[in-house]
Image: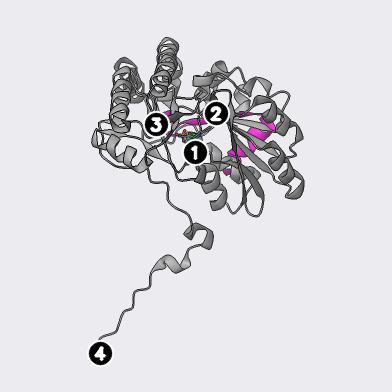
């Protein structure tokens, strides 16, 4: 018998050139005691609320598909945001909202403007959708004794006329830099843009500024929000968009048919009712932010950028990989960002009082 030679050829040769160049989004799996790398809430959903969610789930049919339009949740969100249920769309995390906005309004061959550095999903999903990504660097300016990262309004506007983009992302406050861009500049860009402006308000509850109240003035603006931060539901994947009814309707055409699970919808409806708990978490984290900033600023060799979110971006005199590793040795996981202006920075979110105190004492030791 003649043995046939089997040559195994890697399927990689079939992959799209643009996908080949992408780096998968793989958060660190370094073991840690204190997880400050993903801007999550340090407070889990209270046990009595979890129990209420379990009870509600028991009455449901797991064998049936659940509401693809997230009707009950949109009603709850209508009360929370003040927008009409028809102006709200729910997705599997803000990530899905970002993808659906790109699929509906950008897609193959269309131009998307992304100020940079910012949240990585905009660029990744726009590339995957076949759009042309136009990255415009943000600028860092000193304001008295503080620093502010802001939009380069002139450069962005040049692309409005040169490239005729269809979609502009603005992260407000910006992740990873931490603070809002100048509001006047944002409004000016909105007023001058002949396309969709997606304003990502994932951290809205920590800073309070919003464009939801101005949506009647700006039918081409869509606001993105999430249940992963203040609402403590990162593991359940719920996000939402608020915008003009006609704009919102387009998102139903590109979403996955049953994009938000039964579990996630019920949990999100229940957590929205927990207004006292939410206020308490909000005030604890905002107070902790003030305290943490003051303490960090007292440490030598660290520059702390202002934050209106639940995290800080810090720059170090010592090499940041050294600081990262030393923090990790003490059980604290932070986030390294690789865009050029952030090469010597770390981003970490605000934890419990105890976690924040340990972070400060560790940094004092490491940077001394
Ligand atoms: N937008 C911003 C600005 C974020 O920081 C994040 C998550 N860190 C998201 C969107 C995605 O949120 P979700 O967990 O709801 O997908």
The label shown at residue 147 is 2
What is the residue that sits farthest to the left in this orientation?
A: 1
* Nearer-the-camera pick, 27 or 11: 27
Q: Mark 1 or mark 3, which is nearer the start of the sequence?
A: 1
Q: Mark 3 or mark 4, which is nearer the start of the sequence?
A: 4
- The residue depicted at 28 percent of the width and 41 percent of the height is 30
According to the picture, the residue beneath numbered tag 4 turns out to be 2
The label shown at residue 301 is 3
Task: Residue 284 in the image: state x and y as whole percent.
Answer: 40, 14
The label shown at residue 16 is none
Note whether ligand 1 is within 8 Å of mark 1.
yes
* Nearer-the-camera pick, 183 or 143: 143
Q: Mark 2 or mark 1, which is nearer the start of the sequence?
A: 1
The label shown at residue 95 is 1
Q: State the separation of the CA atoms marked 2 and 4.
A: 74 Å
Badge nearest the viewer, 1 or 2 = 2
């Amino acid at each position: 018998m003649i043995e046939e030679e089997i040559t195994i050829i890697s399927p990689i040769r079939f992959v799209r050139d643009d996908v080949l160049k992408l780096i998968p989004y793989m958060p660190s799996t370094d073991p840690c005691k204190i997880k400050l790398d993903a801007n999550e809430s340090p407070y889990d959903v209270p046990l009595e609320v979890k129990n209420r969610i379990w009870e509600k789930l028991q009455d449901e049919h797991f064998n049936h598909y659940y509401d693809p339009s997230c009707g009950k949740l949109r009603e709850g969100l209508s009360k929370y945001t003040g927008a009409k249920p028809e102006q709200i769309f729910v997705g599997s995390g803000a990530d899905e909202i970002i993808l659906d906005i790109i699929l509906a309004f950008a897609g193959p061959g269309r131009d998307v403007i992304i100020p940079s550095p910012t949240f990585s999903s905009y660029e990744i999903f726009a590339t995957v959708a076949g759009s042309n990504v136009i990255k415009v660097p943000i600028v860092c300016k000193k304001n008295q004794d503080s620093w502010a990262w802001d939009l380069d309004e002139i450069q962005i506007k040049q692309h409005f006329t040169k490239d005729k983009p269809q979609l502009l992302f603005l992260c407000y406050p910006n992740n990873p830099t931490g603070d809002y861009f100048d509001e006047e500049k944002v409004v000016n860009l909105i007023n001058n843009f002949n396309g969709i402006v997606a304003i990502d308000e994932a951290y809205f509850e920590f800073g309070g500024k919003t464009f939801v109240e101005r949506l009647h003035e700006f039918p081409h603006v869509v606001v993105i929000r999430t249940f992963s931060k203040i609402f403590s539901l990162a593991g359940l994947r719920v996000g939402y968009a608020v915008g003009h009814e006609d704009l919102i309707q387009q998102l139903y055409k590109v979403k996955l048919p049953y994009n938000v699970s039964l579990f996630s919808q019920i949990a999100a409806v229940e957590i929205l009712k927990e207004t006292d708990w939410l206020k308490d978490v909000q005030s604890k984290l905002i107070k902790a932010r003030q305290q943490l900033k003051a303490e960090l600023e007292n440490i030598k060799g660290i520059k702390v950028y202002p934050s209106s979110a639940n995290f800080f971006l810090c720059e170090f005199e010592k090499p940041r990989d050294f600081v990262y590793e030393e923090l990790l040795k003490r059980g604290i996981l932070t986030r390294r960002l690789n865009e050029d202006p952030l090469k010597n920075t770390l981003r970490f979110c605000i934890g419990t009082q105890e976690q924040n105190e340990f972070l400060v004492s560790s940094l004092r030791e490491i940077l001394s």
